[in-house]
Structures are given as C-alpha cells and as structure tokens.
Amino acid sequence: MQKKIALINDVTGFGRCSIAVMAPIVSAMKIQAVTIPTAILSTHTQFPLYFFDDYTPKMKDYIQTYKDLDMKFDGISTGFLGSLEQVEIVIDFFKSFKKKDTFVLVDPVMGDYGKLYKTYTPEMCEKMKELVQYADVLTPNLTELCTLIGCEYPEERVTIQQLDDMCKQLSEHGPAHIVVTGIPFNKTQIMNFIYNKGEDFQLVMVDRIGGDRSGTGDVISSIIAGMVMNGHTVYESVKKAATFVSKCIKYCEAEEVPNHWGLCFEMFLKDLMED
Ligand code: PXL
C-alpha cells in the first residue's frame, strides 16, 4: 500500500517553504502527504510584509479527527513551531501516532548563524529537547545543535571531532541519525555531517553557490524523509537532497531568481521520481 506522511508545518502562500514544498516533493516520491497546518501565512517571514494566522487554537480539534478515525501514518515530519503550546501538541501527536515502524523526522527550526529566532523562549527550547527524543532522523543546523545540547556556538570553525562529540551527546536522548546541515567548511564548500549512533559518521560536501535561499531546509528534510521511507539509507538520502538542491540553486542563479523566492524545485521534480 502507498505510504502516508503527516507534515506538521506552516502553509505559506508565496516563497516556497514548508508544506508548499514538502507536499509536492514527497508526492513526487509516491508518498501521500497529509497536511497538518501550524500557521497560515501569505508569504514567509523574510518578506517585509506578510499575513500570519497562528493555527495553534485549532490544531487539537484538527488532530482529534485523525485520532477518532484511527488514522495510521508511516511517517511524521515536523518543522517550524511557533509557540510552547504547539511543541506540546506535536509531542502529544507523537505519543498517539508514532508506532514501532513509524519514521519520524524532526527539523528543529530554532535559529541560524548562532542566534535563536525571536519567537524562541527558554521554555520553548526546553520543550524542544523533549520533542527531539522522538526523532529517528534529526536535521539541525549548527546553531540548533548547540542550543539543543546547551553549548556555546563556536566562534572558530567547528572540527569534525567536536561535531561527533556534540551529536553523540544529543543522540543519547533519542535520535539514531543526526544530519547537521549547512556547516560552513571553506570559501567554496559547505559540509553536511551525518552522525549514525553506534556507527561511523559520514560527510556530504556541497559547493557553495550564491546566498542562502529560503525553504532550502524544507526541501532537504522532505527529500530525506521520502528517501528513507522508500528504503534508502540516510547517507543516500542526504546525497540525493544535496545534489537536488545544488541543481535548483544553479538554475535559480542563472535565472536571477531572488533568494527569498526559494528554490525552483518544480523544474526538477522528475529527478525525485523512481520507477
Ligand atoms: O523554513 C523556512 C520557513 C518556513 N516557514 C516560515 C518561514 C520560513 C523562513 O523564513 O518564515 C513561516
């Protein structure tokens, strides 16, 4: 039977992020997307102006119907969460719907470049530590990794040994695989560090082209989720995501698409389709 993934994330009209990219990507990978909105926005928050409707007060009733219908999910993925209550709702969702074979990917969207997003309170950070325990694969950037283990963001370039130690510490609380994304490596390359509990780490290097594009993390996490659910290893999944993102960025640069318009993933969706 076709697999189903619950996508707990925001619905943003313009700017190619969250559910707007994750649903088509997993669909291309033959997985049925079930949308659970956390907020509805007209554009993402990198635009000077956006409409924002917090969906927190509706989420419990929304999810209750899935409980009453005894719905089963083969996968669950979560992204940006806007309030303490939302993190609690997602923890409750895991308690109800994470079964033995359910694949869980948590993208702990909390901050970037050593700083937490303005919406992140210390209470939310503490709750996020509880949330990540449910993840099979966790996809933090370096800022989020440091926050989750309570260490300072490194001023100097981080070493492989430091990354391995930090991930080891975090994996003791749950996730078997931690993919630390977008680590600046040198002038021309970005590193993705894959920690595998009880096994060797792996590296996936990518060329640095252009500036950061919104929604890149969502493209990466949905490809990883889709690939793993389709039976691939985490390493193969990260490789696939990195290659796909590079191709999208090259196209966007050539077409001079603004960074905050996100990745033109639509042009390459067929790369994600398997027979
Ligand atoms: O993952 C990117 C993203 C998702 N959702 C919202 C955002 C952003 C990036 O700014 O604003 C609402």
Image (cartoon, rainbow, N blue to C red):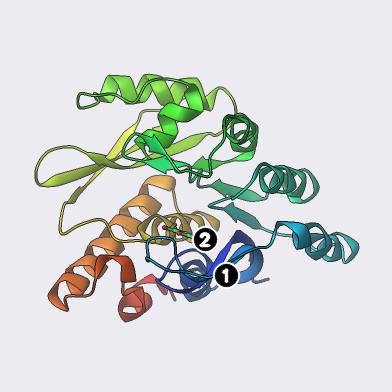
Look at mark 2 in the image and give the residue it sits on.
Answer: 230
- State the SS at label 2: loop
Q: Within 10 Å of the Cα at label 2, are there few (<14), some (14-19), or many (20+) other Cα atoms?
A: some
Task: Give the left or right position of residue 256, taking residue 195 as reference.
Answer: left
Task: Give the left or right position of residue 97, taking residue 25 as reference.
Answer: right
Q: Is residue 165 above or below residue 199?
A: above
- Residue found at x 34% / y 26%: 153
* Label ID, residue 31: 1
For the residues labelled 2 and 1, say whether their Cβ atoms are less than 8 Å apart. yes
- Residue found at x 12% / y 38%: 186
Task: Give the left or right position of residue 233, taking residue 91 as reference.
Answer: left
Q: Residue 210, percent across and down? A: 16, 59
Task: Give the left or right position of residue 77, taking residue 185 as reference.
Answer: right
Q: Residue 34, percent across and down? A: 66, 69
Q: Which quadrant contains ligand 1?
A: bottom left
- Judge whether residue 99 can be spotted in this image: no
